[in-house]
Image: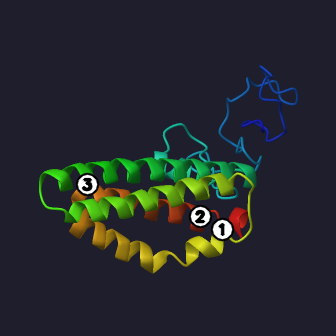
Amino acid sequence: MYCKNCGKEVNENQAICLNCGVKNGVGDKYCRHCGSEVNPQAEICLNCGMAIKNNVSIHQSSIKAGTREEAYAKLAHYEKISAIVWFVIAGLQIIIGIFSYYAPILIGLWNIYAGLSRLKYSKLLEGTPEGVYEYFKKQGTSNIVFLVLNIFLGGLIGGIAAGFDIYIRKYVMDNEEFFN
């Protein structure tokens, strides 16, 4: 962590910067994540992409990772969330299929498979494997096809889940330096 007033490295447990004497976390001249000089009106650091103000939107602050380990941990977490969402959708589709016509049951079974594959992949990511960037890069077109199919066959909730998978791909593409 770096002092936002002078840019020197500080311990996050220090009350003040030992270099300039300013209270830790006060200032707007330097990025607290990388120590680079920043524009006081900027929302994100142009050097590292991290939020430098508290009012940055969730999207801006969450799309860039700070370290390789953080990037893999966040991706594994996203994949676990995706698995849970697909399991919930599958359960709903199977219940609907039991009480109506049987086609939603088949779609629900497919979504159980989707959830299991994401859960398996999230566990694999804990070992920071190689080839993650290439894996997600290849999914661009298939994610769009999957989104359209889910909106058509699974309704809005299926579209939202497929949209989350597209967001996960974007996270990997935006953090290429950690996954490539």
Q: Circles 1 and 2: CB distance less than 8 Å? A: yes
Q: Nearer the viewer, mark 1 or mark 2?
A: 1
Observer able to see residue 67:
no
Q: CA distance from mark 1 to mark 3?
A: 31 Å
Q: Quadrant of the N terminus?
A: top right
Give residue 165's position: percent from left, percent from top.
Answer: 45, 61
Front in this rendered view, residue 152 or 62? 152
Element on which disc 2 rests: helix
The kind of residue tagged 3 is: Gln
* Residue furthest out toward the left: 100
Question: Which residue is found at the position 44% from the left and 47% from the top?
Answer: 84
The kind of residue tagged 1 is: Val
Give residue 169's position: percent from left, percent from top.
Answer: 52, 65
Q: How is the image coloured?
A: rainbow
* CA neighbours of label 2 inside 10 A, class few (<14), some (14 to 19), many (20+): many
| Numbered circle sitting on residue 132 | 1
Location of mark 2 (residue) = 172
Give residue 146's position: percent from left, percent from top.
Answer: 36, 72
* CA neighbours of label 1 inside 10 A, class few (<14), some (14 to 19), many (20+): some
Front in this rendered view, residue 115 or 58? 115
Indicate which disc, 2 or 3, sits on the residue closer to the N terminus: 3
Observer able to see residue 102:
yes
Q: In the rendered view, does 143 fall on the left or right side of 67?
A: left
Question: Which residue is found at the position 67% from the left and 57% from the top?
Answer: 124
Location of mark 3 (residue) = 93
Q: Is residue 139 above or below residue 123?
A: below
Indicate which disc, 1 or 2, sits on the residue closer to the N terminus: 1
Q: Nearer the viewer, mark 1 or mark 3?
A: 3
Front in this rendered view, residue 71 or 26? 71
Q: Circles 2 and 3: CB distance less than 8 Å? A: no
Which quadrant of the view contains residue 155?
bottom left
